[in-house]
Amino acid sequence: MSSVAKPHRTTPAAVTVRRAVVVTRPTLYDELLERHGTRGQIDFVLRDRGRNIAELDAAHAAQQAALHTVGGGVPLAWRRAHVDRADLDRFLFEPDDVVVAVGPDGLVANLAKYLDGQPVIGVDAGDGRSVGRLTATRPGDVAAMLTRSDNDSSLTYQELTMVEAELDDGRKLRALNEVFVGHRSHQSARYTLTIGQQRERQSSSGLIVSSGTGATGWAASIHRATQCGLPLPKVDDPHLLLLVREAWPSAITGTDLVAATVTPDEPCTITSAMEGGTVFGDGIEADPLPFDHGRTVTVRPSPARLRLVLAPDEGGNS
């Protein structure tokens, strides 16, 4: 009996359709509406404070207009998703996502730790809350940027250094601007700080380890107050800067190691000598690592980087 070969059928490879993920945060109008319940009550509260609800209306309308423009610029073949800042910890980003953050600069910092190499386009919502460094793209430029990303990946990126904190039990936290280590209240933070061969027991208002992206914010304020002498890192520098806040000299605590450069090969380690210690990133106190007595945290530059898409005016292709 002769056998007849059956035709070989191949399964076509799955085609990945890219997805645009638009990330937003509530406007001030949204926040007050949630608190006070009605527009009329917002108006009453603001008038009692000598303010005008028209200011909030203008900022809210500006963000809505930006979102409308951004939404209209997403290629028709792409998938779409919209996530609020409060839901980022429950949202699953996909490897081929392009993230469009519409809002103030802090929104980009808020979402950075949830990403793994996905490009981010920071869009100025026009509501007056952006300083323009991370959200410098105009809403009208998004369509062309997404199209180029889909066709030939011709976008220009800047790789931003991030900060990583790792507890001795393996739990980790990443931040774009800075990591804070200290007490979760206004009490003094007590710990032992080690960098390379330097080691010092300290009592202070806590310390931060800042990237170059964070160097224009909290780090700049501490740097100015302490006059430490070390330069603040630039946005693309691979190293970090440690700054101690208000170190207190005593018979058992010192003030010599209050500023230092932190590198992958020479991280800083902090061992807690307090109850109520905390480690958090980018000002998000609600998402901390616990840092009670005996715990050790190591802070270093993160191997992950934030891929920020440059706006046309910053050197990105127009």
Image (cartoon, rainbow, N blue to C red):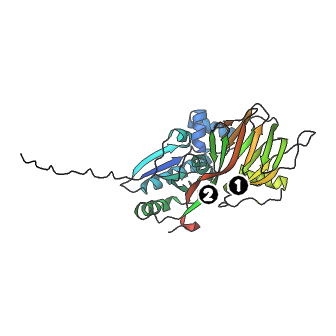
Residue labelled with disc 2 = 160
Q: Are marks 2 and 1 in contact (CB under 8 Å)?
A: no
37 versus 153 height, above or below: above
59 to the left or right of 289: left
5 to the left or right of 189: left
The amino acid at mark 2 is Leu
Give x and y (percent) for residue 239. 69, 57
Residue 178 makes an appearance in the image: no
Q: Secondary structure at mark 1?
A: loop
268 versus 291 height, above or below: below
3 to the left or right of 122: left
Q: Neighbour class for label 1 at 10 Å: few (<14), some, many (≥20)?
A: some
Residue labelled with disc 1 = 263
Residue 209 makes an appearance in the image: yes
Q: Earlier in the sequence, mark 2 or mark 1?
A: 2
Residue that appears at 53% across and 53% down: 117
Give x and y (percent) for residue 3. 10, 47
